Image: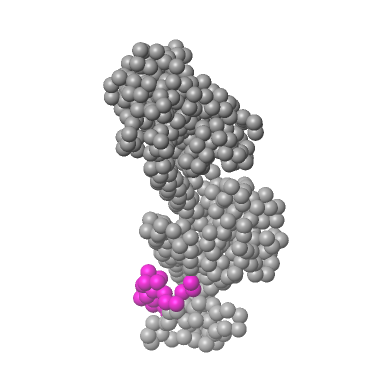
Amino acid sequence: MTPEVPPLRTLPDPLRQTLQDFEQALSVGLRLYQCGREGEADVLLYPLARGAHVPDPGSAGPETGEEALIRRTLSVRDGPGLELELVGAPRGREESLADLVVASLERVLELSQEVRFFTYELSERYEEINLLYSISETLGSLLRLDDAARVILGEVCDVLGARRGSLWVFDQDHRALELVAAVGEEGLGGPLAVDDPHSVTAQVFREGRPLIVARAGFPRDTRAPVEETGDSLLSVPIRYSPPAGEARTVGVVNLIGRRKGGRFTAGDQKLLSAIASQVGAALENHRLIRESLAQERVAREMELAHNLQMKLLPDASAFEGADVAARVQPAEQVGGDFFHLLHLPGGRFGVMIGDVSTHGFPAALIMALSMSAAAIFALEVGEPSRVFRYLDDALRDELETTEMYLSLFYGILDPGDGKLTYANAGHPHAFALHEDGSYERLGATDPPVGIAGPGSFQARTVPWTPAEDVLFLFTDGLSDTLSAVEGGRGEEAVLRTAMAGRKGNLEAVVEALFRKAEEASPAIPADDRTALLMRV
């Protein structure tokens, strides 16, 4: 931004003092005019000394003996010209004295104009520095990006005399520039495609360099054809330079049209680039804060989902009529493992464990659906095979859509008749632990729910010794974790731990199993882990 030094209204003190010194030393009269514009009168800046005689121009001459009047033009670097009149010089020395006075005045005037120029330039720089400081305060005090951008654009337009200011930010998802804020005249509202060949804003974003263009008329957006005459547009990329890595363009700031006409200057571009640098850092901070808040929100939502999912599971320690210990540990905040405990008519107990084929949030949704439906069907239709049939019909569409399946074990323990009736839909880890130290695998009767066909699901019945036998169910997340330290024999390690503690506190067995899994894999588990032991 080039300062425009206004014309002289009064003489600088050094110039006035010089004129007075010459008048006294040379005994001459001096008068200094500022030349008026065409049709306007000259402005008298310095009068002759009081009492000096001023002859009528043209009346003096060598033959009259009267004093001659000499008129000279001073060389001026900027602004209107100056005219000097000298009268009263001795005959024959008029020209030499006039040369001396003019040369001296021009040197003094040059120095005075230098002082005035730098004074105005300093004033302009102070305004720019004050603007940059104000922008720093704005970016630090306003949390909303659009509010801060409008304040900044308003101040920039005031300082640079722009009719419209606009700030565009790159949207990575849509590959477009979105208008964040605008002040002044109406203009384009966006979005702007970054590959738009007719948009100056898009061009500046793509090339990452500022651009000053002139356009005919009064531009109201950045799509008007570019011409070499007329109004002016200043467009500057907003760049962010990270501590490590390459700088990148994150947006564009535009100034369109000058209130007093004319083109934006290189100085205007330099100032706007400095402002854009501040805005670039603010945009990056805003993006990081937004992402952080989004992550915090997701974390809170996932924590809530975890708590809700855990509340869906029954409290094994509070289950009456049987000794039960159970635990579910999702691989993530939520998972697809679950168990269910039911009191059935005739003093019987229903026990179910399920494992959705994936983990995470999608599996948790299937888990919730499966638990709700299984509880309803178990109470309504009774036999494990029929429960699976109804469950498969209810979940088939959802499982096909999500490309998941569900391994499931459901057993009914009847202490009175001494038997266990169960159906096993592809669940590999179901065992009956006996008093004599042996165990029996309760093998699969059918494929998993979601894969088995319409004619699937059967039930088996095995003998059960109350108060001695223990039903032991777990998912492969537990055995797979121990396989890493057991040479691929994770299931054997799980069974050894369960068999060793089957006669004691079942909760201690569950605790030992999960402690071993944590020691084997201190990081987040690869799959959900679940274990359940039951003695009736």
Q: Is residue 199 above or below residue 413?
A: below
Horizontal placement of 312 versus 208: left or right?
A: left
Q: Nearer the viewer, residue 176 or 99?
A: 176
Residue at x 42% of width, y 77% of height: 10
Q: Is residue 193 above or below residue 421?
A: below
Residue at x 33% of width, y 34% of height: 321
Q: Is residue 235 above or below residue 449?
A: below
Horizontal placement of 346 versus 362: left or right?
A: left
The C terminus lies in quadrant = top left
Asked if the magenta segment contains residue 257, the reply would be no
Q: Position of residue 33 (x, y in %)?
A: 49, 78
Q: Position of residue 71 (x, y in %)?
A: 53, 77
Residue 303 in view (yes/no): no
Residue at x 64% of width, y 31% of height: 455
Residue 97 in view (yes/no): yes
Q: Nearer the viewer, residue 79 or 199?
A: 199
Horizontal placement of 294 versus 323: left or right?
A: right
Say how many tags the image has. Answer: 0
Q: Position of residue 121 (x, y in %)?
A: 44, 62
Q: Nearer the viewer, residue 215 or 109?
A: 215
Q: Nearer the viewer, residue 119 or 370?
A: 370
Q: Position of residue 296 (x, y in %)?
A: 41, 46
Region rendered in magenta: 6-31
Q: How is the image coloured?
A: one colour
Residue at x 46% of width, y 85% of height: 54
Horizontal placement of 445 versus 115: left or right?
A: right
Picture quadrant of residue 509: top left
